[in-house]
Image (cartoon, rainbow, N blue to C red):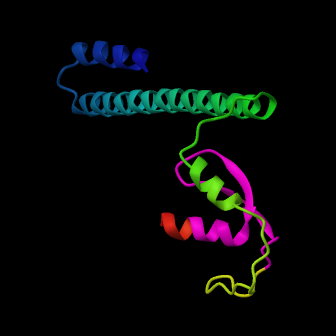
Amino acid sequence: MKFFSVFIEVRFLTNPMDPGMKQLQESLTEIEIEAEHLLLARHQLVENDKARNGNREALTALRKKACTTRSSVPSAFKTIMREVEGTEARPMMKEVCATCGNYDSKNRTWMMFPGSDIFACVPFHAAHTILEKGG
């Protein structure tokens, strides 16, 4: 693009009265500016992708470390998990939930706790109760 601008400027200087050349030069200048904006946006997109990939790799490393060692990823929901686990005592009466109806307390589902990156397999009733309290 620079070559065309220089070429137009040289032609323009040799013939300053030609309005067509002046219009062509202005058009090429606008195109060049837009192309530079496009390249800057593309560069920003690449930088954002690099940062996102770095974050994803870090989370993967934390998950692997949590699964293979005694350390774990800290969670604000540790107390919720303690409440959910509770005791496995059999209730005297069958519970009926307004949301899930006549549910099986042994039916478990995977959920990701709000505001964290931790998955847990919890009873369905506990999962929807936690989500309803949070939202």
Q: Residue at x 72, y 70 (%)?
A: 124
Q: Quadrant of residue 53?
A: top right
Q: Which residue range is magenta in the image?
A: 104-130
The quarter of the picture where residue 94 lies is: bottom right
Per the image, is 105 magenta?
Answer: yes
Pick whichever, 99 or 25, lies toward us: 99
For image coordinates 75% across by 29% down, the residue present is 70
**Does the magenta segment cover residue 6?**
no
Q: Is residue 114 above or below residue 44?
A: below
Q: Position of residue 100 (x, y in %)?
A: 68, 82
Image location (x, y in percent) of residue 30: 32, 33
As displayed, is residue 1 above or below residue 70?
above
Q: Is residue 119 left or right of residue 104?
A: left
Along the viewing direction, whichever of 80 and 4 lies nearer the viewer: 80
Across and down, in percent, residue 88 comes to: 78, 65
Judge from the rendering whether residue 100 lies leftward or rightward of residue 114; answer left or right: right
